[in-house]
Structure formats: structure tokens, C-alpha cells
Amino acid sequence: MPDLQNRAADLILKTVPRLMGTLSSDLRRVAQNLSPGHFQILLFLAHGESNLTTLATELVVTLPTMSNTVSTLAQRGWVALRRDPTDRRRLMVSLSPEGWATLEEIRDIAIAKIEHTLESLTDVECRKVIEGLTILDGALAGDS
């Protein structure tokens, strides 16, 4: 089993950057200087408002890094910032209307690009991809 896990891990490490690489140029056309980290934050915030500490923990970066990144996103108008009324020290972050629009545009482009890539697969192969990614997503959710 460890050999299978090693092969799976190696394939994931090879595939994810390749996938992100194919998306990067298309995504940068929509939003200049959009990094994968920015995209991850926008996706995370699509599920609701968050504070900096939670964002940093979920995206596995330091609090100063997240603070700088969120400041950049706020300057671009993609996120809205407000102080938590129950704890004025805590900064709350949410998607702004422009952030929602940008995220939707990015998501549409990413899905179209991935769909195009998957067109060469048979229905059976597509179902296997869905099954494998669903299992991986569940395993990652369990690691949280």
C-alpha cells in the first residue's frame, strides 16, 4: 500500500502544477497579476466572510503573509474589510461585488479550459476522474 500511496502522491504533485500552469495564462488575462494564492482566497471567501487568522490557517501561510495578500486584494477592490464588532482587533474579510464578479469570470474561464482538456476522455474516464477527485477531496477535508 505505501508504494501505491507514493505513486498517487507523486502523480498529484506532477498533475496539480501542470493544471494550474495551463490555467495561469488564461486567468491572468482576466485579472492581471492574479496569483494562485489570490484565487484560493477568493474561492475560500465565496463560502462566507472570514477573519485573517482563519484565512492564514486554511491556506497554510503566516498571518503577516495573509495580511499583505488581503491588503493587495482590498486595493484591487476584490475584498471588503471591516472590524469585528465583538472584537475590534479582528479584521473580517469578505468578497466585494467586484470580487464576486472577478471570481465568477475566473471560474468560468477555468471550467471552460478544464472542460476542453477533458473532451479527449471517454465518459468512463471522466467518471473515474470525478470518483478519484471526490475521494481525494474527502481525504483532504478529513485532514483539516
Image (cartoon, grey):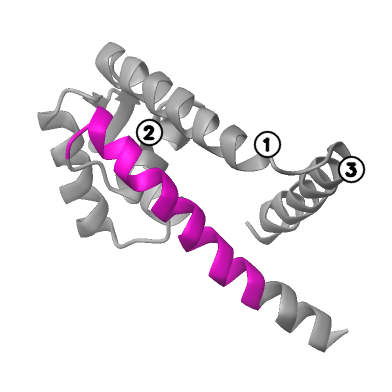
Asked which secondary structure carries label 1, the reply is loop
Distance, label 2 to label 3, CA atoms, is: 32 Å
Looking at the image, can residue 120 be seen? yes
Q: Position of residue 140 (x, y in %)?
A: 67, 57
Q: Which residue is mark 2?
A: 42
Placement of 125 over or under 7, stated as above or below: above
The secondary structure making up most of the magenta span is: helix
Disc 3 crowd rating (10 Å Cα; few below 14, some 14-19, many 20+) is few
Query: Which numbered marker is on residue 124?
Result: 3
User: Do the residues under discs 1 and 2 have CB atoms within 8 angstroms?
Assistant: no
Q: Which residue is mark 1?
A: 119
Q: Position of residue 96 (x, y in %)?
A: 28, 17
**Residue drawn 47% across the image and 23% down it:** 108
Quadrant location of the N terminus?
A: bottom right
On the picture, is 67 further left or further right than 132?
Answer: left
Q: Position of residue 24 (x, y in %)?
A: 34, 46
Going from N to C along the chain, the mark reached first, 2 or 3, is 2
Q: Which residues are magenta?
A: 10-32
Asked which secondary structure carries label 2, the reply is helix
Going from N to C along the chain, the mark reached first, 1 or 3, is 1
Residue type for callout 1: Glu
Disc 1 crowd rating (10 Å Cα; few below 14, some 14-19, many 20+) is few
On the picture, is 53 further left or further right than 108?
Answer: left
